[in-house]
Amino acid sequence: MKDCTIIGGGPAGLNATLVLGRARRDVVLVDNNDPRNKVTFASHGFVTRDGVSPSEFRQLANQEFNRYPSITTLQDKVVEIIRKAEGFTIKTELGQEWATRKIILATGVKERFPNIPNLRNFYGRSIFNCPYCDGWELRDQPLALFGVVDYTFHTAEILRNWSQDLVIFTNGEELTKNQEEQIKKSNLRVETSPIRLLTGQDGILQKVELENGLVIERVGGFITPELEQATDLGTLLGVKLNETGGHHSDEVGNTKITGLFVAGEASNVYPSQLIIAAASGVETAMAVNVELTHEGVLGSEK
């Protein structure tokens, strides 16, 4: 019987693992090594790790785990969670199975992109989804903004801190009268024609070609994808999603399912930030440790 199983090896899961390992809890971290930010070459906004690649971030975390015999890490995928009278049974894709008192679901979210031809060729190299993460690198450059109109207006306001040269591409979505009025007030350029093609080299955007024949030069940009939970493990256990798409839980990630916690974007989808997810992992791990202590389960002697 493990004290806690952490599912998902992003910043929330990694930090939760570290905190519980240091609390002498017998923990297992299960991760399938398929993070959402794997296309990104550098992560930003995390003090002392600004500019670190996602793969290096994970590697450094796992090196730290080697100090703690209470931590076990598995590269695998959890495919089923079975509720038991005391805790849960975990089953994985590779056929492993074990019992655990608590679970922290830290599987994050996945992105649904608008239908823009060859967008994936540029995503993570010159087109990003977070101005706070990548705006500095594109400062004062001619930028494109893609996505659902209401979201892009908000992003455009924020993005002006880094560049004034912005064009919003709605990819065929027409503006409402209220949106047209908002455009006039904000002095933003908007192109509603569907996008025919994005062109560039080695992942660096150069031009946006529209169906109406316009070709607009841009060197990069941002997109506002829709985010949804990366796994249905939580909902299959009976946890409903909140209005932002995260699992219903209290402020420390405790769900209505006894022993099941959520952390990071499994709990709060927005804002999507590395350091915020990591902090969430700390809070949730501490809550798990307190609950185990109240139940009379003390730390292992490992």
Image (tube, rainbow, N blue to C red):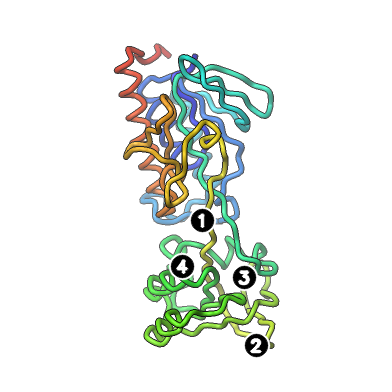
Circles 2, 4 touching at the beta carbon (< 8 Å)? no
Circles 3, 4 touching at the beta carbon (< 8 Å)? no
Point out residue 242 in the picture as x, y percentages from the top left corner.
43, 46
Mark 3 is on which residue type?
A: Ile
Between marks 1 and 4, how big is the CA–CA gap? 24 Å
Residue denoted by label 3: 204
Using the image, determine if residue 59 lies above or below residue 102.
below
> Which residue is drawn at the image coordinates 44% and 56% (left, top)?
44
**Count of number-bearing discs:** 4
Pick the residue in front: 9 or 87: 87
Mark 1 is on which residue type?
A: Ala
Point out residue 176 in the picture as x, y percentages from the top left corner.
49, 79
Using the image, determine if residue 100 lies above or below residue 186.
above
> Which residue is drawn at the image coordinates 39% and 38% (left, top)?
281
Mark 1 or mark 4: whose residue is earlier in sequence: 1
1 or 4: mark nearer the eye: 4
Numbered label attached to residue 214: 2
Mark 3 or mark 4: whose residue is earlier in sequence: 4
* Position of residue 259 in the picture relative to residue 205 (left or right): left
Between marks 2 and 3, how big is the CA–CA gap? 20 Å
2 or 3: mark nearer the eye: 2
Q: For the residue labelled by badge 2, is the local secondary structure a helix, a strand or a loop?
A: loop
Mark 4 is on which residue type?
A: Tyr
Crowd around label 1: few <14 · some 14–19 · many ≥20 (10 Å): many
Pick the residue in front: 201 or 269: 269
Residue denoted by label 1: 42
Crowd around label 3: few <14 · some 14–19 · many ≥20 (10 Å): some
Mark 2 is on which residue type?
A: Leu
Between marks 2 and 4, how big is the CA–CA gap? 24 Å
